Amino acid sequence: MARIGHNGAEHGENAMVNGSVVCQKPLRVTRSYLPPLGEYIELLRGIWDNRVLTNQGGNVCRLQRELDTCLGVRGALVVANGTLALQIALTAVGARGGEVVTTPFSYVATAHSILWEHCTPIFVDIEPEHFTIDPGKIEAAITPHTRAILPVHVFGYSCDTDAIRTIAADHKLPVIYDGAHAFGARYKGKSLLSYGDISTCSFHATKLFHTVEGGAVITRDPELAAKMDLMRRFGHNGDEHFCVGINAKMSELHAAMGLAILPHVREIICRRQRICEQYDSLLAGVVEHPSDQPDLEPNYGYYPVLFRDEAQLKKVFAALAAQEIYPRRYFFPALNLIPHVTDKSSCPVAQDIASRIACLPLSDGMTSEDVERVCLTLHLALKSS
Ligand SMILES: *Cc1c(COP(=O)(O)O)cnc(C)c1O
């Protein structure tokens, strides 16, 4: 491990005043990327010139085209956020009111979007290697009321898409992948967002690629695409009304942010890769981190680590917080244990993982000294725990 100065003061960020450290840069689990301001202003100028602010304007259309090219998918439809993307997808496949087989290890929006559509989430435990839904346990959860399967490519790790496709086909069920973490990841040679009947993505400010708030639905099925296109804008086209829709439109200002960030996304991923590789080398043998997944080109969206147990996690968190380092408990608690869900059946693997997993600070702007600071503090905290 590289050595850092006493209190990490050698890089000009920290100053000793009366023996205490001041102005130490806080390191949070993530820090939103912002494009060069001039590039965003250029796009705003276009909006000021033509006064189109929303309703599928030029920026939204261009963002959709550029997302298709960047990801290698067809017909990405952008929406106001990743939660609405899930809700629209659930309604489009006819899941409303039925049971939806899903994972207990995800952000709460996965379960809440299911509940919001008056569906019942049925939780199937995860596999312990990469925390995605355990395909061997899906069939036992399927009933005559099941309307969809909604797995999550959590942290950008791929679900077992082959096994899930087979099960879904056997039971004639649609698959919706929550790909909120999947942007830029490729699995078996194609975008991780191109699997399932529908894949959704989130472009929230905390995600790898963002539009401040935003999301997308992606499908190869032209009928589903047409339906979701209408649903995101009140279900009508001019005076013709087709279905019950909602307002899930992305504004031109949000699309402009996406257009300003997209040209930098390769570079963002590369910088995150370097940070993850530095974590890998400094933390090898120190703390558990998932192995590389075969067939996956990762997007380096998150750096999850597993502690021995929750007590150790809490001790380490306290030691890190004292150095202004703030990892996050992604994801805790397991979703089968949150209020408002009725299926509380036990998911021992997810509950164990959720109790002792956290994501370390990771953003494109982190320096190698920042990574060293996290790792050194972690080392010391683990030694004394
Ligand atoms: C962020 C996130 C969402 C929700 O996306 P929003 O754009 O914030 O609505 C859904 N699922 C997962 C797994 C997420 O991490």
Image (tube, rainbow, N blue to C red):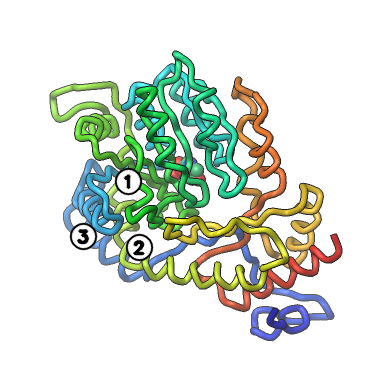
Q: Which quadrant holds residue 147?
A: top left
Q: Measured along the vertical axis of the image, is residue 98 above or below residue 108?
A: above
Residue, far right: 384
**Whole-percent x and y of residue 285?**
71, 66
Which residue type carries mark 2? Ile
Question: What residue appears at the point 24 percent right and 29 percent down from the top-left corner?
Answer: 227
**Structural crowding at the residue carrying mark 3, measured as other residues with C-alpha within 10 Å and reported as few (<14), some (14–19) or many (≥20):** some
- Residue position for label 2: 261
**Whole-percent x and y of residue 245?**
29, 26
Which secondary structure lies at badge 3? helix
Q: Measured along the vertical axis of the image, is residue 262 above or below residue 339?
A: below
- Residue position for label 1: 194
Q: Residues at badges 1 and 3 in contact (C-beta under 8 Å)?
A: no
Question: What residue appears at the point 34 percent right and 52 percent down from the top-left corner?
Answer: 191
Which residue type carries mark 3? Gly
Q: Earlier in the sequence, mark 2 or mark 1?
A: 1
**Structural crowding at the residue carrying mark 1, measured as other residues with C-alpha within 10 Å and reported as few (<14), some (14–19) or many (≥20):** many
What number is the disc on residue 46?
A: 3
User: Closer to us: mark 3 or mark 2?
Assistant: 2
Q: Measured along the vertical axis of the image, is residue 217 above or below residue 171?
A: below
Q: CA distance from mark 3 to mark 2?
A: 16 Å
**Whole-percent x and y of residue 342?**
60, 20
Question: What residue appears at the point 68 percent right and 73 percent down from the top-left corner?
Answer: 373
Q: Earlier in the sequence, mark 3 or mark 2?
A: 3
**Structural crowding at the residue carrying mark 2, measured as other residues with C-alpha within 10 Å and reported as few (<14), some (14–19) or many (≥20):** many
